[in-house]
Every structure is written in C-alpha cells, then in structure tokens.
C-alpha cells in the first residue's frame, strides 16, 4: 500500500506534462508483463515511459509504490453491477473478458502466475485488488440472492462463480492472439451463453448442487 510519505512526495517537484503520470503507470504494467517482478525497477520504467528517473522519485519512493499504484490506478476493482443474478454475472463475465484481452493482458497473466510462486507482499496486494476482493464482493452478493430465494436452495455459490470465472479465464488465456480482435465483438454473445448455461441450462440442479 502506498505510504503517506509517498503520497506527499507525489505533490512535490516540477509539474509534469499532461498525461506523463499515466504514461508511467502504463509503462509499469507493460514492463511487468514483459519481464516480471524480479526485473521490474524504476530505471527501466523511466526508460520505457521516456521520463527522467530522478523526477519519478518525487512521486514514488520505490518500485513497490509504483507497482501497486499502476495496478490500482489502471485496473478497476469493481463492485457487483446489476439488480439480478443474471445481470451481475453477465456484467462480471464481460468485464473480466475485456480486462483479460485488453491492453494490460500481459501484466494480468503475469500476476496470475507469479502469485503462485512469488512471496513479495506487493504481489499479494496487487492480486487482492485485481482478483480476490472484487470476486469476494460478488460471492457475497450471490449469497444474498440465495438467502432471498433468488437462487435455488441447493445451489453452490462457490461452484457457480467458479464456473463463470474459470470459463472466462481459460477462454481469454487460451485464445490465439490472431483471433482476439474478431472475438471482441462476440463477447456479449459468449457471456450471455455462458451465464445462461450455468443459470438456466439443462442439468442445472445436478451441476450446481454441492456444499457452498
């Protein structure tokens, strides 16, 4: 998490040209996606962004501050959007698919892999922001629907959400690069079918019944 001191340093020094800070954050995610945490540092980010390294230190104390600012600044951590189970899952599936196929796709994939083997706390913090916290909020919302009777009593909220999140993740990560542009226009149909299969498809009772 960015410290108070680091936040204060961001307001010190010569004003930046418009868009420079965003370019630095974008370059940070690009660099991380290309070479991972162990190769990530302010010098390389400055070179990639085309800014002076010294000026970056007036805003970020170290690579941890910059790294986490890049994730929290460029990748939303959304709350559940929608008034029904269908709407929430449709919005979540489309958001995730576009996120995984968007300009920060390499950084997200890198984070997903490094979380399993990298012990640095900042990796965990970025992972929590990107994956754990927003998905936990959706899980809690689905439990509210289940408690209210909007989902069958035997529905496993965990398995339902796993089916949606896992399908989107695998589809995005396994899609050949040459097919991405074409697939972008098909995302609404894909997520509609995906959510429909899970909520209204044949064998729903058998598929979703389990300990939640």
Image: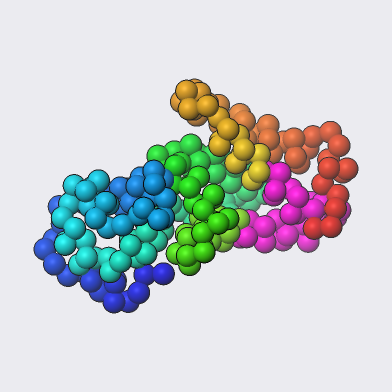
Specify whether residue 73 is in view.
Answer: no
Residue 12 % position (x, y): 17, 70
Question: Outermost residue toward the left?
Answer: 14
- Per the image, is 149 magenta? yes
Chief SS of the magenta region: helix
The residue positioned 47% from the left and 65% from the top of the image is 120
Q: Residue at x 26, y 51 (%)?
A: 44
Position of the C terminus, as image quadrant, is: bottom right
Picture layout, residue 94 above or below residue 32:
above
Residue 131 in percent (x, y) is at 55, 55
Picture coordinates of residue 172, whole percent (x, y): 56, 36
Decide if residue 159 is on the left or right side of residue 30.
right
Task: Please give left or right for residue 29 compared with residue 165 in the image.
Answer: left
Q: Residue at x 36, y 53 (%)?
A: 39
Query: Residue at left 87%, top 43%?
Result: 205
Colouring scheme, one of rainbow, by chain, secondary structure, one colour: rainbow
Residue 173, image quadrant = top right
The residues colored magenta run: 136-164
Q: Judge by depth and name the residue closer to the eye, 186 or 103.
A: 103
- Is residue 98 or residue 24 the one in the foreground? 24
Q: Taking 86 as reference, is 181 left or right?
A: left
Nearer to me, 22 or 190: 22
Asked if the stretch drawn in magenta spans residue 100, the answer is no
Spot the residue most to the bottom: 5
Left or right: 15, with 79 as reference point: left
| Residue 54 x/y as whole percent | 16, 62
Q: Is residue 15 above or below residue 87?
A: below
For the question of whether residue 183 can be seen, the reply is yes
Q: Quadrant of the N terminus?
A: bottom left
């Amino acid at each position: 998490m960015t410290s108070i001191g680091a936040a204060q340093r961001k307001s010190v020094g010569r004003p930046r040209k418009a868009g420079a800070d965003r370019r630095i954050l974008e370059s940070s995610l690009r660099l991380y996606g290309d070479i991972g945490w162990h190769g990530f540092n302010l010098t390389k980010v400055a070179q990639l962004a085309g800014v002076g390294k010294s000026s970056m230190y007036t805003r970020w104390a170290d690579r941890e501050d910059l790294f986490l600012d890049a994730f929290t600044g460029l990748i939303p951590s959304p709350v559940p959007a929608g008034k029904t189970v269908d709407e929430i899952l449709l919005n979540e599936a489309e958001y995730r698919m576009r996120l995984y196929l968007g300009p920060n796709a390499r950084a997200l994939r890198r984070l997903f892999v490094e979380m399993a083997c990298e012990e640095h706390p900042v990796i965990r913090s970025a992972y929590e922001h990107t994956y754990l916290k927003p998905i936990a909020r959706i899980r809690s919302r689905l439990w509210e629907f289940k408690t209210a009777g909007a989902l069958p009593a035997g529905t496993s909220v965990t398995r339902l959400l796993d089916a949606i999140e896992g399908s989107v993740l695998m589809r995005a990560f396994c899609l050949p690069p040459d097919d991405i542009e074409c697939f972008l226009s098909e995302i609404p149909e894909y997520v509609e079918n995906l959510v429909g299969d899970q909520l209204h498809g044949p064998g729903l009772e058998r598929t979703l019944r389990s300990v939640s």
